């Protein structure tokens, strides 16, 4: 199953077009709830999205007055191709890490497909985190960006607008400013992106080896495109379980 055109929001590669939108596009239509959408009261202000209902039922994340913003947390994505170990960085993106750990704890990511693999010279990522497997699904809430400010300019971009999202980076996909939900992407080769995607951690060496195996399989061919560079991975990828590691100090 290929990612639908609506789900990719991807322009044709070209000098002017941004062929590297890493998008999590909203569904086209849905029933709006009658009561006003809820927003959590803490600094992260996670907001319900009634027009984009959750792909799998999950409550809003906790949002305490003080968001944990120090230290790192380890999470392992157990996939059908091997483990992908993640180290989440609370200082870089406290609200993002808090939300991600909430979704991990509620088993939102268990038994989900990674629906998109890109293999452009300037965009090499595996995108996951949508239980519907379509690229349009999310957790039924959104929250604001926590954007990186210190990324080096991408040498491939003469305009200087794109930055290097380095191999091993873990970042949030989105559908525009402040639309983070549950979809994330794992960078397996240095990529050139506008710095519009929250970076909230990194992939470990074993995880990169797993990603390399998935990327080596390429993108699944379709009738329209026998050699695509963006679409479903040819080797289907399932996150069987996402597990948080609790370290004892």
Image (spheres, rainbow, N blue to C red):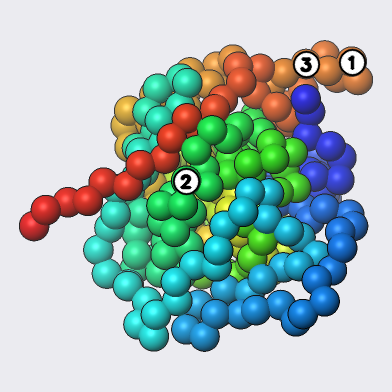
* For marks 2 and 1 on the same chain, the one whose residue lies earlier in the sequence: 2
Q: Nearer the viewer, residue 196 or 77?
A: 77
Report if residue 37 is visible in the image.
yes
Q: What residue is shown at x 86% (from left), y 59% (from top)?
A: 30
**Image quadrant in which the C terminus is located:** bottom left
With 6 as the anchor, is 111 left or right in this view? left
Q: Are marks 2 and 1 in contact (CB under 8 Å)?
A: no
Coordinates of residue 211 in the picture (x, y in percent): 47, 27
With 243 as the anchor, is 228 left or right in this view? right
**Image quadrant in which the N terminus is located:** top right
* Label ID, residue 223: 1
Q: Nearer the viewer, mark 2 or mark 1?
A: 2
User: Which residue is the site of mark 3?
Assistant: 221
Q: Nearer the viewer, residue 204 or 44?
A: 44
Q: What residue is shown at x 47% (from left), y 30% (from top)?
A: 240
Coordinates of residue 222 in the picture (x, y in percent): 83, 18
With 101 as the anchor, is 58 left or right in this view? right
Task: Give the CA distance from mark 2 to mark 3.
Answer: 31 Å
């Amino acid at each position: 199953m290929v990612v639908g055109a609506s789900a990719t929001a991807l322009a044709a590669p070209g000098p002017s077009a941004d062929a590297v939108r890493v998008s999590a596009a909203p569904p086209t239509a849905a029933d709006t709830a009658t009561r006003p959408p809820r927003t959590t009261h803490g600094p992260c202000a996670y907001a319900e999205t009634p027009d984009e209902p959750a792909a799998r039922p999950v409550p809003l994340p906790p949002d305490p007055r003080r968001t944990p913003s120090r230290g790192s947390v380890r999470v392992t994505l157990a996939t059908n191709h091997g483990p992908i170990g993640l180290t989440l960085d609370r200082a870089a993106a406290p609200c993002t890490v808090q939300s991600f750990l909430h979704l991990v704890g509620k088993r939102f990511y268990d038994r989900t497909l990674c629906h998109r693999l890109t293999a452009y010279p300037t965009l090499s990522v595996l995108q996951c985190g949508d239980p519907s497997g379509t690229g349009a699904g999310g957790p039924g809430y959104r929250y604001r960006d926590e954007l990186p400010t210190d990324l080096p300019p991408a040498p491939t971009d003469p305009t200087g607008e794109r930055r290097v999202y380095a191999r091993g980076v873990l970042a949030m996909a989105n559908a525009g400013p402040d639309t983070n939900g549950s979809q994330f992407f794992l960078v397996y080769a240095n990529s050139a992106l506008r710095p519009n995607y929250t970076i909230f951690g990194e992939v470990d060496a074993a995880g990169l080896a797993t990603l390399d195996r998935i990327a080596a399989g390429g993108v699944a061919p379709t009738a329209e495109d026998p050699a695509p560079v963006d679409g479903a991975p040819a080797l289907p990828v399932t996150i069987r379980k996402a597990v948080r590691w609790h370290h004892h100090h």
